[in-house]
Amino acid sequence: MPPPRPELLRHPLPGDLHRSPVEPGSGWPEDPAEPGTRVARTPAGVVRSAAASRTTEQLDARVSVCRACPRLVAWREEVAATGRRAYRDQPYWGRPISGWGDAHAPLLVVGLAPAAHGGNRTGRVFTGDRSGDWIFAALHRAGLAAQERSDHAGDGQHLTGVRIAAAVRCAPPDNLPTPDERAACAPWLDREVQLVRPRVLLALGGIAWDASLACARRLGWAVPRPAPRFGHGARAVLALPGQDGGGAVHLVGSYHVSQQNTSTGRLTEAMLDDAVALAAALAGLPGAGAPGPRG
């Protein structure tokens, strides 16, 4: 067992002292919550809390303090308390990860779940790990992210026309949430889609693809039958109820930006750029379809 970490550690950017996990409203950069933010403690509580969220800001705050899944709460907080050797001088966020980016983005990128020493450490989705390096670099090449990297909350990163969210908001053991945990977390994604109203969903991986289709069904959207199959570059059109023409939402698939995929060449930068360019073009984002130079 590693020795216990100090109770208070300094955040890498502002240098403020924080406990791990971070207390809501304690000054962590980009923390959407306050000490009195409503906490969902059961799956039924998630349903109520999500449905009652009137803005993305309110939703983000409530997501970031959720305690509905005991196994995930215990795991994310254990990781925060022990840390990885490379980050043992840093406090860990250790809470759920809210969606991040434009509040009304036409393009919503959907991932699986935060990494134990990535988002669970930094407090921002896809931030501080190799998977995040890949997706933010691709968004930067497409002109949709201000910086090539996303290392810490408060680092000046900014997205244009894009929002990123995860199907499951807490870091799961072995990167594998249970079916019950995925179901308990689903209302957060449902409400986020309702509030953001994206024109395109870019699903990173098969689980995110399935979560996006399940979300569409719960919201009453028309999903093709048989269900569209996931694949890199796969594409489906989902129709909103009572609308036609402009009421379509496009679903685009990409292999996940996991190290297993990127280190083996199953997913290359060119492949990811193509998927981002397709999603951005369908979303009508300016300059979409012409990624910048790689290297």
Image: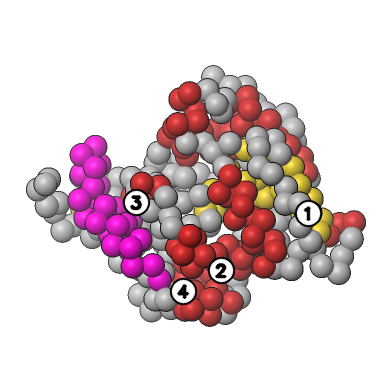
Q: Are marks 1 and 3 in contact (CB under 8 Å)?
A: no
Q: Residue at x 72, y 51 (%)?
A: 227
Q: CA distance from mark 4 to mark 3?
A: 19 Å
Q: Which residue is mark 1?
A: 225
Ranked by sequence position, the earlier of labels 4 and 3 is: 4
- On the picture, is 47 further left or further right than 223? left
Q: CA distance from mark 2 to mark 4?
A: 9 Å
Q: Which residue is mark 3?
A: 173
Q: CA distance from mark 1 to mark 3?
A: 34 Å
- On the picture, is 23 further left or further right than 130? left
Q: CA distance from mark 2 to mark 1?
A: 23 Å
Q: Residue 42, labelled with which disc?
A: none
Q: Is residue 17 visible?
A: no
Q: Which residues are magenta?
A: 68-93
Q: CA distance from mark 4 to mark 1?
A: 29 Å
Q: Which residue is mark 2?
A: 187
Q: Are marks 4 and 3 in contact (CB under 8 Å)?
A: no
Q: Secondary structure at mark 1?
A: loop
